[in-house]
Image: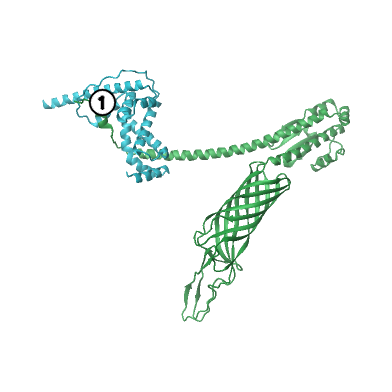
C-alpha cells in the first residue's frame, strides 16, 4: 500500500520518466533530408531576395530617371505656354493678326506625348494639320524629339536659334512666318531650359565609373637584408573604379586595379657567375642557388648545367646582368573621396584601404626579360593604404578627365617569413576618364 | 557523452556538419522518442513530433548557451514541439473547474512500461498533456496554464481527471491480470 498522495503519479513517473525508445531506422534520413531542403530553400530565398533587390534597384533607377526627365519636360512645357500667354509682344500681335485663331489655339494646346516607338524618347508636339507637314528637331543625346510647325522661310530673327536649328538639321518647309516667330521664341526658351536641365541633372548623378592608367615608382620600407644593392622600380598598372556619390562632397569608390611593383637588384655581388671547372668527367650539376633580397629569398629556377672535362661552365641564365624582382597584384580598394572643389575643374582628396591579391611573383633578367626565379614565402593577400589628390576637368556633363598623384603603402610585410620585413610603397600618377551614368 | 566532445559536436552541428548532427541524433533520439511517446497518442504521432523536434533543435541550436544540461534543453524543445502540435489542433474546451480530490491509496502491482504508456496515450489529449507536463516533466500548474493557454484551475482539474482515469484503468488492468492468474491456478 502506498501512503503518499501522489502514488499514481509515482507509478507513472517511475516507469516512464526515463523512457528510451529507438525510433524507426529511416527517421534520421527524413530529418537530414528536411534540414538540407531547408538550407536549400534558405539559399534560394537569399538568391531570390538578392535578385529581387537588384531588379528593384534597376527598376528604381529606370523609373527615377524617367520621372526626373518627365518632370523637367513638363516644366519646360508650362514655361513655354506661359511665354505664349503672358508675353503679347508686337511679334505675337502680328501672329494674332496673321495666324488663324485655330493655329494660336493649337499652339496653346501644345502637349507632350510619349513616343510610342521608344520609351526613352519624348516628343514635344505643336500640333498643326498633320505630322508630315512638320519640321523635326532631334536632340539625339537626350532622346528628345521636338516637332515644329512647318516653315517656308529661313529663321533669321534669332541667331542663337538659327544656329541650333541649323545644327539639328531643320529643313525649310511651307508655314506662315508669324507662326515661325512664335515657334522660334518658344524653341529658344526650350533649348535654354534643356541646357539648364543638363547642368542640373549632372549634379544629381550619383554613380560614375573611372578608367585609370597608372604609372608609379615603387620602393620599400623595411629592413635592408639583401645580397645585392636594390633600387626602386617604375611600372605601369591600371583598372576600373566605381564611384558612388553619397552626398554633395563625399563619395565611396571601389573597383579592381592591376598593379605591379618590385625592385631592381644590381649585380654587385657575384654569387654564381661563371666558374671554370676542370673536371675529367662529364656530369650534371643542379645549382638552384638562393639569393637573399629584402623582399625574401629568391629561388632560382632551372639553373642546372652540363659541363665536361676542360670545359668552362656557362650558366644558362645570364646572372651577370641586373635582375628585376617583380610582383603583380590585383587591388580591390575601398576609398573615401572628399570633394574640395566641384566645378568644371574639380579637386578631390581620397584615402582608403585596399586588399591586394598577389597574382604574380617572378624574378627576371633586366635585359633579356627571361624569368630566372621567384621570391619564396610571398603572402597571397596583403593590405595597403593609399592617399591621393585628384584633379578633374569636366569635358561634358557625363565625361571628365582625371589626373591623380597617389601614394600607396603596404601595411603588412608581403613575405610570410618573419626574417623579412618588406613593406613596399609606391608613388604614382593615375590618369583616366570618368563617366557619369 | 563527455562535455568537451559534446561541445565540439554541438558547434559542428551549428556549422551544419551532417556527421555531427547525426551523432547528436543517435545519442539523444531514443530519450527524446520516450518524451514524444508520452505526449502522443500513437507511435507514429510520436515520430512526427520527434521529426519536427529535431528539425527545431538543429535550427535553434545556436541559441544554446552551453549553460546547464543539453539534454534538458533538448527535452524542452521537444515538449514545446508537442505542445505546438496540440495547440495547432485548435481545441475548444469548456473551462472545467474541480475541487482537488483526495487521492485514495492504491495497491501497487506490476505494470509493464508498454501498459503504462498505453494508458497515457489513451487519455484524452488535454489530460495527457497536463499529466505528462506535471507528473513526468515537472512543470508547475501556472506554467502549464500559460503554455496551454488555460487557467490554473483547468490545469489542476485536468490533472485530477487524468489521475482518475489512469487509476481506474490501472485497477481494471490489475483485476484482469488477477483474474487471468486465478484461472491459471484453477
Q: Position of residue B86 (x, y in %)?
A: 37, 27
Q: In the image shown, does A245 or A132 lie closer to the viewer?
A: A245
For the C terminus of chain B, the quadrant is: top left
Picture quadrant where residue A194 is located: top right
- Is B78 on the left or on the right of A209, as rendered? left
Q: In the image shown, does A374 or A188 lie closer to the viewer?
A: A374
Q: Is residue B169 above or below residue A280?
A: above
Q: Is residue A228 above or below residue A347?
A: below
What residue appears at the point 34 percent right and 36 percent down from the top-left corner? B72
**Local SS, label 1:** loop
- Is B104 on the left or on the right of A85, as rendered? left
- Is A385 on the left or on the right of B116, as rendered? right
Q: Please, which colouring scheme is shown? A: by chain
Total numbered labels placed on residues in the image = 1
Indicate the chain coloured cyan by its letter: B
Picture quadrant where residue B53 is located: top left
What residue appears at the point 37 percent right and 44 percent down from the top-left corner? B7
Q: Is residue A244 above or below residue A376?
A: above
Q: Is residue A180 above or below residue A209?
A: above
Disc 1 chain ID: A
Q: Is residue A322 visible?
A: yes
What residue is shown with label 1? A6
Most extreme residue toward the front, as rendered? Answer: A223
Q: Position of residue A428 (x, y in %)?
A: 65, 57
Indicate the chain coloured green by its letter: A
Q: Is residue A23 visible?
A: no
Q: Position of residue A135 (x, y in %)?
A: 80, 36
Picture quadrant where residue B78 is located: top left
Number of other residues with Cα within 10 Å of mark 1, as a class: few under 14, some 14 to 19, many 20 or more: some
Amino acid at each position: 500500500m502506498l501512503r503518499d498522495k501522489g502514488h499514481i503519479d509515482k507509478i507513472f513517473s517511475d516507469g516512464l520518466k526515463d523512457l528510451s525508445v529507438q525510433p524507426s531506422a529511416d527517421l534520421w534520413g527524413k530529418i537530414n533530408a528536411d534540414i538540407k531542403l531547408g538550407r536549400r530553400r534558405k539559399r534560394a530565398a537569399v538568391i531570390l531576395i538578392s535578385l529581387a533587390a537588384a531588379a528593384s534597384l534597376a527598376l528604381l533607377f529606370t523609373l527615377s530617371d524617367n520621372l526626373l526627365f518627365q518632370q523637367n519636360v513638363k516644366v519646360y512645357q508650362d514655361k513655354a505656354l506661359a511665354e505664349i500667354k503672358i508675353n503679347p509682344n508686337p511679334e505675337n500681335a502680328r501672329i494674332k493678326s496673321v495666324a488663324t485663331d485655330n493655329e494660336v489655339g493649337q499652339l496653346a494646346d501644345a502637349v507632350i506625348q510619349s513616343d510610342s516607338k521608344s520609351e526613352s524618347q519624348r516628343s514635344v508636339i505643336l500640333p498643326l494639320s498633320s505630322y508630315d507637314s512638320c519640321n523635326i528637331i532631334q536632340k539625339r543625346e537626350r532622346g528628345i524629339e521636338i516637332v515644329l510647325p512647318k516653315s517656308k522661310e529661313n529663321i533669321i530673327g534669332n541667331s542663337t536659334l538659327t544656329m541650333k536649328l541649323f545644327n539639328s538639321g531643320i529643313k525649310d518647309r511651307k508655314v506662315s512666318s508669324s507662326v515661325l516667330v512664335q515657334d522660334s521664341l518658344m524653341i529658344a526658351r526650350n533649348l535654354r531650359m534643356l541646357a539648364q536641365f543638363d547642368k542640373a541633372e549632372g549634379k544629381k548623378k550619383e554613380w560614375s565609373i573611372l578608367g585609370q592608367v597608372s604609372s608609379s615608382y615603387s620602393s620599400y620600407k623595411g629592413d635592408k637584408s639583401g645580397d645585392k644593392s636594390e633600387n626602386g622600380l617604375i611600372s605601369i598598372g591600371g583598372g576600373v573604379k566605381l564611384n558612388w556619390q553619397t552626398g554633395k562632397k563625399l563619395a565611396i569608390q571601389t573597383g579592381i586595379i592591376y598593379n605591379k611593383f618590385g625592385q631592381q637588384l644590381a649585380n654587385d655581388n657575384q654569387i654564381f657567375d661563371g666558374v671554370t671547372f676542370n673536371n675529367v668527367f662529364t656530369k650534371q650539376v643542379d645549382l638552384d642557388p638562393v639569393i637573399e633580397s629584402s623582399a625574401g629569398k629568391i629561388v632560382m629556377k632551372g639553373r642546372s648545367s652540363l659541363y665536361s672535362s676542360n670545359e668552362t661552365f656557362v650558366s644558362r641564365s645570364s646572372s651577370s646582368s641586373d635582375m628585376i624582382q617583380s610582383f603583380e597584384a590585383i587591388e580591390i580598394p575601398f576609398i573615401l573621396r572628399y570633394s574640395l572643389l566641384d566645378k568644371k575643374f574639380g579637386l578631390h582628396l581620397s584615402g582608403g584601404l585596399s586588399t591586394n591579391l598577389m597574382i604574380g611573383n617572378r624574378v627576371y633578367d633586366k635585359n633579356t626579360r627571361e624569368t630566372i626565379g621567384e621570391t619564396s614565402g610571398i603572402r597571397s593577400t596583403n593590405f595597403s593604404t593609399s592617399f591621393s589628390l585628384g584633379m578633374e576637368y569636366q569635358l561634358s556633363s557625363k565625361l571628365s578627365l582625371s589626373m591623380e598623384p597617389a601614394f600607396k603603402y603596404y601595411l603588412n610585410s608581403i613575405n610570410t617569413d618573419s626574417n623579412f620585413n618588406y613593406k613596399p610603397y609606391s608613388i604614382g600618377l593615375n590618369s583616366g576618364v570618368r563617366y557619369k551614368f | 557523452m563527455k562535455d568537451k566532445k559534446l561541445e565540439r559536436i554541438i558547434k559542428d552541428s551549428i556549422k551544419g556538419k551532417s556527421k555531427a548532427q547525426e551523432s547528436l541524433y543517435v545519442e539523444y533520439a531514443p530519450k527524446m522518442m520516450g518524451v514524444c511517446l508520452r505526449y502522443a497518442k500513437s507511435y507514429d504521432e510520436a515520430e512526427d513530433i520527434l521529426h519536427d523536434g529535431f528539425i527545431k533543435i538543429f535550427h535553434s541550436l545556436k541559441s544554446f548557451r552551453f549553460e546547464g544540461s543539453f539534454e534538458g534543453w533538448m527535452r524542452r524543445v521537444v515538449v514545446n514541439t508537442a505542445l505546438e502540435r496540440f495547440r495547432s489542433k485548435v481545441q475548444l474546451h469548456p473551462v472545467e473547474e474541480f475541487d482537488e480530490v483526495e487521492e485514495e491509496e492504491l495497491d501497487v502491482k506490476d505494470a509493464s512500461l508498454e501498459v503504462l504508456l498505453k494508458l497515457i496515450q489513451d487519455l484524452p489529449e488535454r489530460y495527457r498533456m497536463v499529466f505528462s507536463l506535471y507528473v513526468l516533466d515537472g512543470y508547475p500548474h501556472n506554467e502549464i496554464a500559460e503554455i496551454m493557454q488555460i487557467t490554473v484551475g483547468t490545469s489542476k482539474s485536468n490533472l485530477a481527471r487524468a489521475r482518475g482515469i489512469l487509476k481506474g484503468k490501472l485497477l481494471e488492468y490489475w483485476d484482469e491480470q488477477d483474474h487471468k492468474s486465478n484461472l491459471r491456478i484453477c
